[in-house]
Image (cartoon, helix red, strand yellow):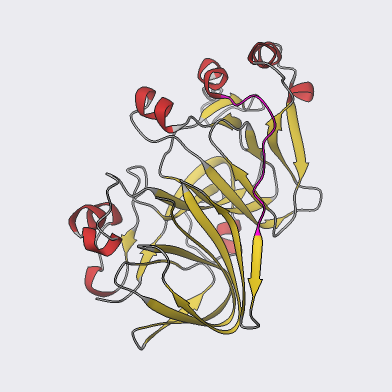
Amino acid sequence: MSEPLFLKPVFHEKIWGGNHLKTVFDYSIPSDHTGECWAISAHPNGVCQVENGQYAGQKLDALYQNQPELFGHPTKAVFPLLTKILDANDWLSVQVHPDDAYGLKHEGELGKTECWYIIAADEDAEIIYGHHAKTRQELADLIAHQDWDHLLKKVKVKAGDFFYVPSGTMHAIGKGILILETQQSSDTTYRVYDFDRKDDEGNLRELHLQQSIDVMTIGEVENSKPKTISDGAADITTFVSNDFFTVYQWQIHGEKAFIKNADYTLVSVIAGQGELVVADTIYPLNKGQHFILPADVASWSISGELSLIASHDGK
């Protein structure tokens, strides 16, 4: 085959969503409250479909099961990663995700370690990244008293920032932030606080206080330390590399040749335009496209002026 798999995104409306997925990426979105673009996903809550080539029309979850050679004959039962773009027109809930052991035991799916690349952010935009509680009892007490000012750690963010968010991390994405998220393929979220918002039917959204206290990490959140290698044609930044995933930014300023270093690679174009060449075939690249380079693509090149976020399974 030796061809990339371009994918059709799946969109989810959210109480906190906006319209930047249309105005920035020109996606056709369901409403002006669209919060999430599931760009590369085989999760049951939003499975992407291949748009090109031999496997056009097939869904990624079925392809992973039925054509394992495309993914290097993986040992993991489900496609392990999920790439999203999130448009936070308002604060997301303050939340936490479980690790694999807790998630599989209580929710029947993987836990959720994730990371964020800030595509755009309003001036003075903030996230919540960790908490100030020194013990689990103090955490429970501050949550019970809804003492958010003393509990929550806020961090100002700007375009180009990167945050590693391991399972157990108290977090929330703030208003006016557009991010690309790379995460484990899980949709389990435990809400701690939701700003007392009500849905369209006037109901408060469900909280999960005991689960949150159970899985929350006590102590400082340690962000990753990106490393960049430049050669004139490209700046290649490794944001994080661990057992869950490796995530890169490829800033292309001309023509850059790549040789694969993983069974398969997930790629999202977040800015600019250019061309991808695989096996002498040229594929135009534009902002908002997402694709997988499968196992039989041993090398490729990208040319133009563009920025991409790439990832692969951490084994």
- The answer to whether residue 33 is seen in the rendering is no
Q: Residue 109 magenta-drawn?
A: no
Residue 170: x and y in percent read 63, 31
The residue that appears at 55% across and 79% down in the rendered structure is: 273
Numbered range of the magenta stretch: 216-226
Snapshot quadrant of residue 139: top right
Residue 142: x and y in percent read 71, 15
On screen, residue 315 versus residue 311, left or right, reads left
On screen, residue 206 versus residue 230, left or right, reads left
The residue that appears at 35% across and 89% down in the rendered structure is: 280
The residue that appears at 37% across and 27% down in the rendered structure is: 107
Instruction: Judge by depth and name the residue closer to the eye, 40 or 137.
Output: 137
Snapshot quadrant of residue 234: bottom right
The residue that appears at 76% across and 41% down in the rendered structure is: 155
- The answer to whether residue 46 is seen in the rendering is yes
Task: From this view, report whether residue 254 is shown above or below residue 146.
Answer: below
The extreme bottom residue here reads 280
Task: From this view, report whether residue 222 is shown above or below residue 79.
Answer: above
Residue 310: x and y in percent read 50, 63
Residue 160: x and y in percent read 69, 60
Give the number of marks.
Answer: 0
Task: From this view, report whether residue 139 is shown above or below residue 38.
Answer: above
The extreme right residue here reads 124
Q: Main secondary structure of the magenta part?
A: loop
On screen, residue 139 versus residue 209, left or right, reads right
Q: Residue 225 magenta-drawn?
A: yes
Quadrant assignment for the N terminus: bottom left
